[in-house]
Amino acid sequence: MKSNLYKNILIATDGSNYSAKTVEHGIEIAKMLGSRVFTVYVVDTGAFASIPMDMAWENIYEMLRSEGKKATDFVKEKGQKEDVEVECIIIDGHPAEEIVNFSENNSIDLIIMGTLGKSGLDRFLLGSIAEKVLRNAKVPVMIIRSEKQDKSTS
């Protein structure tokens, strides 16, 4: 079922175990609609703004970029298994801002991303990337709520 409604889908990933469910949903939707997927990982450089640029920061930065490559490669592999075209992108900056900017500058029709479902004080203190994208994106945003591990079953 080809559709012109969502030709370009952005799957935002952070490489966590929680994002696997988001990737699964995103690839399935792209497969059903015949869409092209862009998977974006944002290296949150805002977290390092106060740290002097030295060897330690460079090592952390390289480690985060490596993590981003693994995360986007995971999406690409899932896409290949389902015959879905996936382009991998790693961006530096503030995650919510960069996801919205990428969507605006690359004709994205739908953003798919996950959330840990934080609430209360956690959400107030940390802010939610998904919430910020939802508020600022000019295209539809699908939020896949991640299931937290139930510690009582281990």
Image: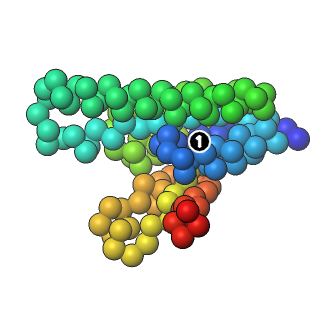
Q: Residue furthest front?
A: 154
For the point 51% across and 66% down, the residue is: 151
Residue corresponding to mark 1: 11
> In what element is the residue under mark 1?
strand
Residue 107 is drawn in which quadrant? top right
Q: Position of residue 67 (x, y in %)?
A: 43, 32
Residues packed near mark 1 inside 10 Å, few (<14), some (14 to 19) or many (20 plus): many
Position of 141 relative to 4 (above/below): below
The colouring scheme, among rainbow, by chain, secondary structure or one colour, is rainbow
Q: Is residue 137 visible?
A: yes
- Tell whether 4 sits left or right of 111: right
Amino acid at circle 1: Ile
Residue 72 is drawn in which quadrant? top right
Quadrant into which the N terminus falls:
top right
Residue 45 is drawn in which quadrant? top left
Q: Position of residue 14 (x, y in %)?
A: 47, 43
Q: Position of residue 20 (x, y in %)?
A: 61, 45
Q: Nearer the viewer, residue 125 or 93?
A: 125
Q: Residue furthest bottom?
A: 120
Position of 60 relative to 118 (above/below): above
For the point 64% across and 50% down, the residue is: 21
- Tell whether 55 sits left or right of 107: left
Q: Nearer the viewer, residue 33 or 21?
A: 21
Position of 54 relative to 31 (above/below): above
For the point 27% across and 31% down, the residue is: 60
Q: Is residue 140 visible?
A: no
Q: Nearer the viewer, residue 116 or 99?
A: 116
Quadrant into which the C terminus falls:
bottom right
Q: Position of residue 53 (x, y in %)?
A: 14, 29
Q: Residue furthest left?
A: 52
For the point 21% across and 40% down, the residue is: 48
Q: Residue furthest right?
A: 1
